[in-house]
Amino acid sequence: MQANPLEAGPQEVGDYLRGLQKRIVSAIESADGSQCVRDEWHKAPGEPLQGSGLTCIMEAGGLFERAGCGFSQVRGPKLPPSATQHRPELAGAPFEAMGVSLVFHPRNPYVPTVHMNVRMLAALPADAPPVCWFGGGMDLTPYYGFEEDAVHFHRACSDALAPFGDDKYPRFKTWCDDYFFLKHRNEQRGVGGIFFDDFSELGFERSFAMLRSVGDAFLPAYLPIVERRRDTLYGERERGFQLYRRGRYVEFNLVWDRGTHFGLQSGGRTESILLSMPPLASWAYRQEPEPGSPEAALYRDFIVRREWL
Protein backbone atom coordinates (compact mmCIF):
# COMPACT_ATOMS: atom_id res chain seq x y z
CA MET A 1 0.00 0.00 0.00
CA GLN A 2 1.11 3.55 -0.57
CA ALA A 3 2.56 5.26 2.49
CA ASN A 4 -0.44 7.57 2.51
CA PRO A 5 -3.19 6.52 0.11
CA LEU A 6 -5.33 9.45 1.25
CA GLU A 7 -3.10 12.02 -0.41
CA ALA A 8 -4.82 11.32 -3.77
CA GLY A 9 -7.09 8.38 -3.07
CA PRO A 10 -10.42 9.93 -2.05
CA GLN A 11 -10.72 12.18 -5.10
CA GLU A 12 -9.95 9.34 -7.51
CA VAL A 13 -12.23 6.88 -5.76
CA GLY A 14 -15.02 9.44 -5.34
CA ASP A 15 -14.90 10.37 -9.03
CA TYR A 16 -15.24 6.71 -10.01
CA LEU A 17 -18.10 6.06 -7.61
CA ARG A 18 -20.10 9.08 -8.73
CA GLY A 19 -19.65 8.02 -12.35
CA LEU A 20 -20.71 4.46 -11.54
CA GLN A 21 -23.88 5.67 -9.84
CA LYS A 22 -24.71 7.84 -12.84
CA ARG A 23 -24.28 4.93 -15.28
CA ILE A 24 -26.38 2.53 -13.21
CA VAL A 25 -29.21 5.01 -12.65
CA SER A 26 -29.31 5.87 -16.35
CA ALA A 27 -29.51 2.17 -17.24
CA ILE A 28 -32.40 1.39 -14.90
CA GLU A 29 -34.31 4.48 -15.99
CA SER A 30 -33.97 3.30 -19.57
CA ALA A 31 -35.08 -0.23 -18.66
CA ASP A 32 -38.06 0.97 -16.63
CA GLY A 33 -39.16 3.98 -18.66
CA SER A 34 -39.47 6.00 -15.42
CA GLN A 35 -37.24 8.61 -13.83
CA CYS A 36 -35.51 8.41 -10.47
CA VAL A 37 -35.94 11.20 -7.96
CA ARG A 38 -32.50 12.70 -7.29
CA ASP A 39 -32.10 13.84 -3.70
CA GLU A 40 -28.80 15.63 -3.05
CA TRP A 41 -28.10 15.97 0.65
CA HIS A 42 -25.54 17.52 3.01
CA LYS A 43 -25.05 16.85 6.69
CA ALA A 44 -25.78 19.95 8.77
CA PRO A 45 -22.90 21.67 10.60
CA GLY A 46 -22.54 20.42 14.14
CA GLU A 47 -23.74 16.88 13.44
CA PRO A 48 -21.35 14.07 14.45
CA LEU A 49 -21.10 12.90 10.85
CA GLN A 50 -20.11 15.36 8.12
CA GLY A 51 -20.34 14.94 4.37
CA SER A 52 -22.76 14.73 1.49
CA GLY A 53 -24.27 12.40 -1.04
CA LEU A 54 -26.82 11.78 -3.72
CA THR A 55 -29.72 9.39 -3.27
CA CYS A 56 -31.48 8.30 -6.46
CA ILE A 57 -34.77 6.51 -5.88
CA MET A 58 -37.46 5.14 -8.17
CA GLU A 59 -40.79 4.19 -6.64
CA ALA A 60 -43.86 2.74 -8.32
CA GLY A 61 -42.10 2.22 -11.64
CA GLY A 62 -43.42 -0.14 -14.27
CA LEU A 63 -40.52 -2.58 -13.89
CA PHE A 64 -39.09 -1.65 -10.49
CA GLU A 65 -41.48 -1.29 -7.59
CA ARG A 66 -38.64 0.36 -5.68
CA ALA A 67 -35.07 0.90 -6.83
CA GLY A 68 -32.58 2.88 -4.79
CA CYS A 69 -28.99 3.73 -5.70
CA GLY A 70 -27.08 5.99 -3.34
CA PHE A 71 -23.65 7.62 -3.23
CA SER A 72 -22.27 9.01 0.00
CA GLN A 73 -18.98 10.50 1.18
CA VAL A 74 -18.81 11.12 4.91
CA ARG A 75 -16.33 11.82 7.69
CA GLY A 76 -16.74 11.07 11.37
CA PRO A 77 -14.83 11.47 14.63
CA LYS A 78 -14.94 7.82 15.66
CA LEU A 79 -15.28 4.52 13.82
CA PRO A 80 -18.44 2.71 14.97
CA PRO A 81 -18.19 -0.80 16.45
CA SER A 82 -19.44 -2.45 13.22
CA ALA A 83 -16.30 -1.20 11.42
CA THR A 84 -13.74 -2.28 14.01
CA GLN A 85 -14.87 -5.75 15.01
CA HIS A 86 -12.01 -7.19 12.90
CA ARG A 87 -9.63 -4.25 13.52
CA PRO A 88 -9.83 -3.50 17.26
CA GLU A 89 -6.60 -1.48 17.11
CA LEU A 90 -8.51 1.21 15.16
CA ALA A 91 -11.29 1.62 17.71
CA GLY A 92 -11.97 5.29 18.30
CA ALA A 93 -10.10 6.53 15.23
CA PRO A 94 -11.61 9.25 13.01
CA PHE A 95 -12.62 7.98 9.58
CA GLU A 96 -13.66 8.82 6.06
CA ALA A 97 -15.99 6.56 4.07
CA MET A 98 -17.46 6.68 0.59
CA GLY A 99 -19.41 4.24 -1.50
CA VAL A 100 -22.23 3.38 -3.86
CA SER A 101 -24.94 1.07 -2.59
CA LEU A 102 -28.05 -0.14 -4.36
CA VAL A 103 -31.00 -2.47 -3.95
CA PHE A 104 -33.57 -3.01 -6.71
CA HIS A 105 -36.96 -4.56 -5.89
CA PRO A 106 -38.72 -5.48 -9.16
CA ARG A 107 -42.49 -5.64 -9.46
CA ASN A 108 -42.60 -9.00 -11.30
CA PRO A 109 -41.94 -11.92 -8.88
CA TYR A 110 -39.96 -13.72 -11.59
CA VAL A 111 -37.37 -10.92 -11.69
CA PRO A 112 -34.96 -11.27 -8.74
CA THR A 113 -34.09 -8.59 -6.25
CA VAL A 114 -30.45 -7.52 -6.44
CA HIS A 115 -28.00 -5.78 -4.13
CA MET A 116 -24.62 -4.25 -4.96
CA ASN A 117 -22.20 -2.16 -2.93
CA VAL A 118 -18.68 -0.86 -3.52
CA ARG A 119 -16.95 1.29 -0.94
CA MET A 120 -13.72 2.61 0.52
CA LEU A 121 -13.13 3.26 4.20
CA ALA A 122 -10.10 5.03 5.69
CA ALA A 123 -9.22 5.22 9.36
CA LEU A 124 -7.16 8.21 10.49
CA PRO A 125 -5.52 7.30 13.83
CA ALA A 126 -3.75 10.19 15.56
CA ASP A 127 -0.55 8.28 16.30
CA ALA A 128 -0.19 6.14 13.16
CA PRO A 129 -0.40 6.44 9.37
CA PRO A 130 -3.87 6.31 7.73
CA VAL A 131 -5.24 2.83 7.08
CA CYS A 132 -7.37 2.37 3.97
CA TRP A 133 -9.39 -0.60 2.76
CA PHE A 134 -12.09 -1.53 0.25
CA GLY A 135 -15.24 -3.61 0.42
CA GLY A 136 -18.26 -4.56 -1.58
CA GLY A 137 -19.79 -7.17 -3.81
CA MET A 138 -23.16 -8.11 -5.26
CA ASP A 139 -25.74 -10.80 -4.58
CA LEU A 140 -28.95 -12.03 -6.21
CA THR A 141 -32.19 -12.88 -4.40
CA PRO A 142 -34.73 -14.67 -6.59
CA TYR A 143 -38.28 -15.53 -5.60
CA TYR A 144 -38.56 -18.13 -8.35
CA GLY A 145 -35.27 -19.78 -9.20
CA PHE A 146 -33.77 -20.33 -12.65
CA GLU A 147 -30.49 -22.17 -13.05
CA GLU A 148 -29.37 -20.13 -16.07
CA ASP A 149 -29.90 -16.86 -14.18
CA ALA A 150 -27.82 -17.95 -11.20
CA VAL A 151 -25.05 -19.28 -13.45
CA HIS A 152 -25.00 -16.07 -15.50
CA PHE A 153 -24.76 -13.90 -12.39
CA HIS A 154 -21.94 -15.95 -10.87
CA ARG A 155 -20.07 -16.09 -14.18
CA ALA A 156 -20.09 -12.29 -14.36
CA CYS A 157 -18.76 -12.12 -10.80
CA SER A 158 -16.06 -14.66 -11.53
CA ASP A 159 -14.97 -12.89 -14.72
CA ALA A 160 -14.72 -9.56 -12.89
CA LEU A 161 -12.34 -11.04 -10.32
CA ALA A 162 -10.29 -13.26 -12.64
CA PRO A 163 -7.56 -10.64 -13.40
CA PHE A 164 -6.83 -10.31 -9.69
CA GLY A 165 -6.07 -13.94 -8.87
CA ASP A 166 -7.64 -17.36 -9.20
CA ASP A 167 -8.39 -17.40 -5.49
CA LYS A 168 -10.61 -14.31 -5.45
CA TYR A 169 -13.91 -15.66 -6.80
CA PRO A 170 -13.90 -18.85 -4.65
CA ARG A 171 -12.95 -16.82 -1.56
CA PHE A 172 -15.45 -14.05 -2.13
CA LYS A 173 -18.21 -16.45 -3.17
CA THR A 174 -17.81 -18.35 0.10
CA TRP A 175 -17.61 -15.04 1.99
CA CYS A 176 -20.89 -14.00 0.38
CA ASP A 177 -22.57 -17.29 1.33
CA ASP A 178 -21.35 -16.85 4.90
CA TYR A 179 -22.36 -13.20 5.13
CA PHE A 180 -25.83 -13.28 3.53
CA PHE A 181 -27.08 -16.00 5.82
CA LEU A 182 -30.07 -15.54 8.12
CA LYS A 183 -28.78 -17.25 11.24
CA HIS A 184 -32.12 -17.01 13.02
CA ARG A 185 -33.78 -18.82 10.07
CA ASN A 186 -30.88 -21.14 9.20
CA GLU A 187 -31.40 -20.01 5.62
CA GLN A 188 -29.45 -18.36 2.80
CA ARG A 189 -30.84 -15.01 1.63
CA GLY A 190 -30.58 -15.91 -2.05
CA VAL A 191 -28.24 -17.55 -4.56
CA GLY A 192 -25.32 -15.40 -3.41
CA GLY A 193 -22.64 -13.79 -5.52
CA ILE A 194 -19.47 -12.24 -4.11
CA PHE A 195 -18.64 -10.25 -0.99
CA PHE A 196 -15.40 -8.86 0.42
CA ASP A 197 -14.47 -6.42 3.16
CA ASP A 198 -11.39 -4.96 4.87
CA PHE A 199 -9.55 -5.60 1.59
CA SER A 200 -6.16 -4.00 0.85
CA GLU A 201 -3.89 -6.98 0.24
CA LEU A 202 -3.11 -6.03 -3.39
CA GLY A 203 -1.98 -2.52 -2.46
CA PHE A 204 -4.03 0.60 -2.97
CA GLU A 205 -3.97 0.81 -6.78
CA ARG A 206 -4.67 -2.87 -7.52
CA SER A 207 -7.27 -3.13 -4.76
CA PHE A 208 -9.00 -0.08 -6.21
CA ALA A 209 -8.79 -1.63 -9.69
CA MET A 210 -10.51 -4.74 -8.36
CA LEU A 211 -13.24 -2.58 -6.84
CA ARG A 212 -13.78 -0.90 -10.23
CA SER A 213 -13.97 -4.27 -11.98
CA VAL A 214 -16.69 -5.42 -9.58
CA GLY A 215 -18.63 -2.19 -9.94
CA ASP A 216 -18.39 -2.26 -13.74
CA ALA A 217 -19.62 -5.88 -13.82
CA PHE A 218 -22.93 -5.12 -12.13
CA LEU A 219 -25.07 -4.08 -15.10
CA PRO A 220 -23.90 -6.96 -17.36
CA ALA A 221 -24.53 -9.36 -14.47
CA TYR A 222 -28.08 -8.21 -13.73
CA LEU A 223 -29.79 -6.57 -16.70
CA PRO A 224 -29.82 -9.65 -18.98
CA ILE A 225 -31.71 -11.52 -16.23
CA VAL A 226 -34.19 -8.66 -15.96
CA GLU A 227 -34.84 -8.68 -19.70
CA ARG A 228 -35.28 -12.45 -19.72
CA ARG A 229 -37.92 -12.47 -16.94
CA ARG A 230 -39.68 -9.09 -16.97
CA ASP A 231 -42.63 -10.15 -19.17
CA THR A 232 -43.30 -13.48 -17.42
CA LEU A 233 -46.98 -13.75 -16.48
CA TYR A 234 -47.80 -14.01 -12.79
CA GLY A 235 -50.83 -13.96 -10.50
CA GLU A 236 -51.82 -13.48 -6.88
CA ARG A 237 -50.04 -16.66 -5.76
CA GLU A 238 -46.66 -15.53 -7.12
CA ARG A 239 -47.16 -12.01 -5.82
CA GLY A 240 -48.02 -13.29 -2.36
CA PHE A 241 -44.92 -15.47 -2.25
CA GLN A 242 -42.76 -12.56 -3.40
CA LEU A 243 -44.01 -10.38 -0.54
CA TYR A 244 -43.49 -13.19 1.96
CA ARG A 245 -39.90 -13.70 0.82
CA ARG A 246 -39.28 -9.95 0.90
CA GLY A 247 -39.89 -10.23 4.63
CA ARG A 248 -36.69 -12.24 4.87
CA TYR A 249 -34.85 -9.40 3.10
CA VAL A 250 -36.07 -6.94 5.72
CA GLU A 251 -35.04 -9.27 8.52
CA PHE A 252 -31.51 -9.65 7.21
CA ASN A 253 -30.93 -5.95 6.58
CA LEU A 254 -32.16 -4.86 9.99
CA VAL A 255 -30.78 -7.69 12.10
CA TRP A 256 -27.49 -8.75 10.47
CA ASP A 257 -26.25 -6.29 7.83
CA ARG A 258 -23.01 -4.52 8.83
CA GLY A 259 -23.59 -1.71 6.34
CA THR A 260 -26.95 -0.85 7.87
CA HIS A 261 -25.47 -1.01 11.35
CA PHE A 262 -22.47 1.15 10.32
CA GLY A 263 -24.74 3.82 8.87
CA LEU A 264 -27.08 3.97 11.85
CA GLN A 265 -24.33 3.70 14.49
CA SER A 266 -22.27 6.47 12.87
CA GLY A 267 -25.16 8.92 12.67
CA GLY A 268 -25.76 8.53 8.95
CA ARG A 269 -28.79 9.67 6.99
CA THR A 270 -31.57 7.23 7.86
CA GLU A 271 -33.62 7.73 4.69
CA SER A 272 -30.60 6.85 2.53
CA ILE A 273 -29.47 3.96 4.75
CA LEU A 274 -32.89 2.34 4.55
CA LEU A 275 -33.37 2.74 0.78
CA SER A 276 -32.82 -1.03 0.63
CA MET A 277 -36.20 -1.71 2.25
CA PRO A 278 -38.92 -3.05 -0.08
CA PRO A 279 -42.10 -0.97 -0.43
CA LEU A 280 -44.26 -3.93 0.58
CA ALA A 281 -43.49 -7.13 2.48
CA SER A 282 -45.45 -9.67 4.49
CA TRP A 283 -45.01 -12.24 7.22
CA ALA A 284 -46.99 -15.39 7.95
CA TYR A 285 -46.76 -17.88 10.79
CA ARG A 286 -45.00 -21.11 9.76
CA GLN A 287 -45.82 -20.82 6.09
CA GLU A 288 -44.74 -23.98 4.27
CA PRO A 289 -44.60 -24.28 0.47
CA GLU A 290 -46.63 -26.98 -1.22
CA PRO A 291 -44.45 -30.05 -1.95
CA GLY A 292 -43.40 -30.19 -5.58
CA SER A 293 -44.29 -26.55 -6.21
CA PRO A 294 -42.02 -23.86 -7.71
CA GLU A 295 -42.02 -22.23 -4.28
CA ALA A 296 -40.70 -25.43 -2.70
CA ALA A 297 -38.03 -25.60 -5.41
CA LEU A 298 -36.69 -22.22 -4.28
CA TYR A 299 -35.94 -23.64 -0.83
CA ARG A 300 -34.69 -26.99 -2.13
CA ASP A 301 -32.53 -25.91 -5.08
CA PHE A 302 -31.69 -22.21 -4.83
CA ILE A 303 -31.42 -20.72 -1.35
CA VAL A 304 -28.88 -23.36 -0.44
CA ARG A 305 -25.11 -23.28 -0.77
CA ARG A 306 -24.15 -24.47 -4.23
CA GLU A 307 -21.25 -24.20 -6.63
CA TRP A 308 -22.94 -22.48 -9.56
CA LEU A 309 -20.00 -22.57 -11.98
Image (cartoon, helix red, strand yellow):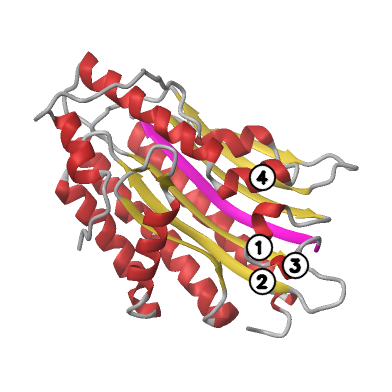
Left or right, 136 with reference to 10: left
Give how far across and how far down residue 93 sits, in percent: 80, 63
Q: Nearer the viewer, residue 224 or 170?
A: 170
Is 102 colored magenta in this rendering? yes
Q: Which residues are magenta?
A: 93-106
Please give the residue where the numbered disc 3 appears in the rendered image.
Answer: 90
Upstream in sequence: badge 2 or badge 4 = 2
Q: Amino acid at mark 1?
A: Leu
Please give the residue where the numbered disc 4 appears in the rendered image.
Answer: 263
Upstream in sequence: badge 1 or badge 2 = 1
Cα separation between marks 3 and 2? 11 Å
Q: Secondary structure at mark 2?
A: strand
Cα separation between marks 1 and 4? 13 Å
Q: Amino acid at mark 4?
A: Gly
Q: Residue at x 32, y 44 (%)?
A: 190
Residue 262's disc number: none
Please give the residue where the numbered disc 2 appears in the rendered image.
Answer: 132
Q: Where 55 sits versus 158, above or below?
A: above
